[in-house]
């Protein structure tokens, strides 16, 4: 898949991002940049979700934190949430 040409973030995503520790924000920013340049980089474990969240995708920030997002048309994405596995509930 080509790199992401445009990204959007919901207010909820921005609020959750701001709640992360400064160190985790730095890691997340690097992972988001990696994702936008190579959405299926192996270290991100980008995957489509199932069940009630089947319209969404997720990628890893670290062992505990994930980004919940959707692909849009024209290589765009929208970020919905960044949190622990609790984002799946």
Image (tube, helix red, strand yellow):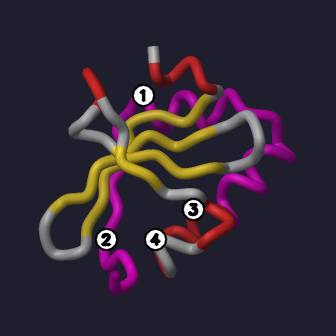
Separation of residues labelled 4 and 3 (CA atoms)? 9 Å
User: Which residue sits furthest right?
Assistant: 23
CB atoms at circles 1 and 2 under 8 Å apart?
no
Separation of residues labelled 2 and 3 (CA atoms)? 12 Å
- The residue indicated by pointer 3 is 32
* Residue 58, above or below 8: above
Residue mark closest to the camera, 3 vs 1: 3
Q: Tell me which label, 1 or 2, sits earlier in the chain.
A: 2
Q: Please provide the residue range marked out in magenta.
A: 1-30
Q: Nearer the viewer, residue 2 or 9?
A: 2
- The residue indicated by pointer 2 is 6
Residue mark closest to the camera, 4 vs 1: 4
The image quadrant where one finds the C terminus is top left
The residue depicted at 52 percent of the width and 43 percent of the height is: 67
The residue depicted at 58 percent of the width and 57 percent of the height is: 45
Q: Is residue 55 magenta?
A: no
Separation of residues labelled 1 and 2 (CA atoms)? 18 Å
The image quadrant where one finds the N terminus is bottom left
Q: Secondary structure at mark 3?
A: helix
The residue depicted at 32 percent of the width and 33 percent of the height is: 50
Q: Secondary structure at mark 2?
A: strand
**Drawn side of residue 22 relative to residue 81, left or right:** right
Measured as percent of width and height from the top left, residue 56 is found at 30, 41
- The residue indicated by pointer 4 is 39
Residue mark closest to the camera, 4 vs 3: 4
């Amino acid at each position: 898949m080509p790199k992401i040409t445009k990204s959007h973030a919901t207010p909820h995503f921005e609020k959750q991002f701001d709640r992360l520790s400064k160190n985790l924000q730095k890691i997340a920013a690097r992972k988001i940049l990696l994702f936008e340049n190579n959405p299926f980089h192996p270290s991100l474990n980008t995957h489509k979700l199932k069940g009630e969240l089947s319209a969404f995708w997720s990628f890893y920030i670290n062992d505990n934190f994930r980004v919940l997002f959707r692909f849009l048309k024209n290589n765009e994405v929208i970020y919905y949430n960044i949190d622990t596995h609790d984002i799946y509930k």
